[in-house]
Amino acid sequence: MFSIFRTVETSVQREVSEVKQRYEDLLRRLQIALTDLDLAQDWVEHMNDLKANEDWVVSTEARTDQTNPTSNEYNPLYKEIELFKPVREDVRSRRAPVTESVNGADHFLRKNRDRMTPKQREALQKRVDDLRNRYNDLDDNSEKDLQDAIERLRRLKDQEDDQVSNNHIKMLSNCVSCT
């Protein structure tokens, strides 16, 4: 009689052990799935942040093209520079947010490289590189355009001053010869 209980007990224990093992396996798979879901959500957040900054860069590139000072006359060039300065300041002010976005995505990529698919890694790295390069180009080019325009304005002012001075000298010499 004792052996029948032992057999039933062993059979029940084995079944409980199997159910417990299946539960632990399911729990482990669920934890892995949740971790993967968190990773995917973080990846999407970084991609969206990079995309938003890249969209800003694209629209600002268009604004710099539209407002880039090009005149070769003093007054119009002065007005163009005044219109361009806020665009340049906008580029300057976005340096920190763009850098933060790029550095955050770089850190995420380094930290989670082995957990991401090759496609995820490549897409994130491409977006990071594109944003970094496009922003740096925009920053460099807008600064150069502004400095070139300011230098051109200075030269035009010097030319205008020289011309006024020469005209003044001519008038004085005409007046001197009249007397």
Image (cartoon, rainbow, N blue to C red):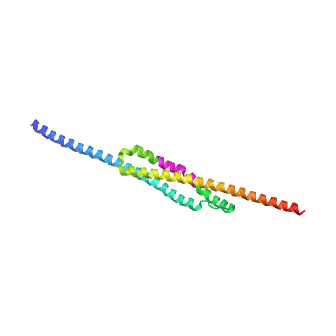
Q: Nearer the viewer, residue 29 or 156?
A: 156
Q: What is the quadrant of residue 174 in the picture?
A: bottom right
* Image vertical order of residue 92 relative to residue 178, above or below: above
* Image vertical order of residue 66 relative to residue 110, above or below: below
Q: In this view, does 84 lie to the left or right of 169?
A: left
Q: Which residue sits at x=38%, y=45%?
A: 113
Q: In this view, does 5 lie to the left or right of 128?
A: left
Q: Percent position (x, y) of residue 17?
A: 21, 41
Q: Give the range drawn in magenta.
A: 89-103
Q: Which residue sits at x=63%, y=56%?
A: 149
Q: Percent position (x, y) of residue 141?
A: 56, 54
Quarter of the image that includes the N terminus: top left
Quarter of the image that includes the C terminus: bottom right
Q: Is residue 156 left or right of residue 166?
A: left
Q: Which residue lies furthest to the left in this view?
A: 1
Decide whether residue 90 is among the magenta residues.
yes
Main SS class of the magenta portion in the image: helix
Task: Report whether residue 58 is seen.
Answer: yes
Marks counted in the figure total: 0
Q: Nearer the viewer, residue 84 or 24?
A: 84
Q: Which residue sits at x=61%, y=55%?
A: 146
Q: Which of 167 and 105 is in front in this view?
A: 167
Task: Report whether residue 89 is seen.
Answer: no
Decide whether residue 73 is among the magenta residues.
no
Q: Which residue sits at x=62%, y=54%?
A: 148
Q: Which residue lies furthest to the top in this view?
A: 2
Q: Residue furthest right?
A: 179
Q: Percent position (x, y) of residue 164?
A: 77, 59
Q: Which of 6 and 58 is in front in this view?
A: 58
